[in-house]
Image (cartoon, coloured by chain):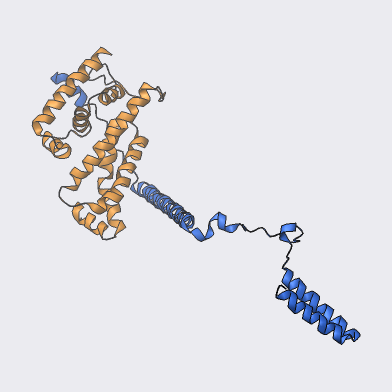
Amino acid sequence: MIDFEKQIMKAQLDGSEPTNADDFLAKLHNRVSESKDNRRTVLTSLCMIIVVSLMTITQFRDKSIQTEFLSNKEIKNPFETDFWNIYSDSLEYDQEFFNNMTYILLDEGYVWETIELMERFKLSKEGL
Amino acid sequence: MQNDHDLIKEYQNGNISAYDQLIKNHLSNTVGFFFNITGDRMVAEDLAQDVFFKLYTHLKKFRFESKFSTYLYRVKLNAANSWLKRNKWKNILHLDQAPDTGERDTELEQEWTRKELWDAVAKLPNKQRKVVIMRIAKEMPYKEISEVTGMTEGTAKVNFHHAVRSLKEWLNND
C-alpha cells in the first residue's frame, strides 16, 4: 500500500516550462471584454423585451382603443331609398307645399286665393 | 513586492494592473497544478484561464477572511474536479479518441500510465477525489487540504487512504 502511495505521489509531471504571462493576460482580457459585451447585449435585449411587453400590456388595458370601438356600429344608408329610411315628416312637407303654393299664387296675382289657401292651411294644421 | 491582499484591495479599487500582477504571481503555480492532472499544457492553460476569469468577477467581493492562496486552491480544485468529471464522461462515450501519450515510468516499474491514474481518480467519490487531486497534483499537506476543503485533517487522511486503496485495486486489475 505504501509503495503504491509513493508511486502515485511520484506521478507528478515537471510543469516547470514557463507560461508566457503576457499572452495569457492578453487572452484573458479579450475574454473578459467579450463577456462584458455579451452581458451588455443580453441586458439590452432584455430591456427591449421588457419595454415592448410593458407597452403591449398597457395597450391591452386601454379600453379606448379596443377593437370594437374602432368599428362604426351605425351603418348609415347613404342613399336612404328604403321605405323605412325615407324622411317623411308630413308637417314639414305640408309647410313646404304651402310656401311654394303661396309664392306661386302671389306671383300670379291671386291674392284672395292666397288668403283662402292660408286659411285652409291654418285649419288643416289645427286638425279640423 | 506587494502581497496578495494588497493587490486585491487595489484591484477592488479599480486598478486592473494589480489584478494582472496577482495573476503573474500565481500563473506558473496554477498552470503547473492543472498540467499535473491533464498532462496537456494547452488544456492546463485553458483551465487556468477559466480560473482567473472566474476570479475576475469574484475577487471584487473577496472579504479577506482567508488567505488568497487557500481561496485560489479552492477554485482550482473545483475546476480540476469538474474537468475530471467531464473527462470521465468523454472516456465513457469514447469522445476522446486521442492516443494515450502517458509514458510508463520504468524506474518505478509501474503497470499504469498517468492517464490511467487520472481516469481512475475521476471515478472516485467527490470527497476522495478532491483530497487525491490535492495530494497528487500539489503534494499538499493534510493541514492545508483541510483548510481548502473544509474537512478535518483526520477526515482528509481517511479519505485519502480509501482513495488509494480503490486506485490500487482498479489500476492493478487493469
Does the rendering let one see residue A50? Answer: yes
Q: Where's residue B6, x and y in %?
A: 20, 56
Q: Which chain is blue?
A: A
Residue B10 located left or right of residue A92? left
Figure check: B145 above or below B122: below
Residue depicted at x 13% and y 36%? B146
Q: The N terminus of chain B lies in which quarter of the figure?
A: bottom left
* Chain B display color: orange
The residue at the far top in this view is: B173
- Which one is nearer the viewer's eye here, B130 or A65? A65
Give the percent coordinates (x, y) of residue B11.
26, 57
Where B142 sits versus A20, above or below? above
- State the residue in front, B151 or A115: A115
Q: State the residue at coordinates (12%, 26%).
A: B158
Which quadrant of the view contains residue A69?
Answer: bottom right
Q: Is residue A59 above or below residue B74?
A: below
Q: Is residue B3 visible?
A: no
Give the camera-side residue of A51 and B124. A51
Q: Residue furthest left?
A: B154
> Can you give x and y, in whole percent of width and height, for residue B10 in the image?
24, 59
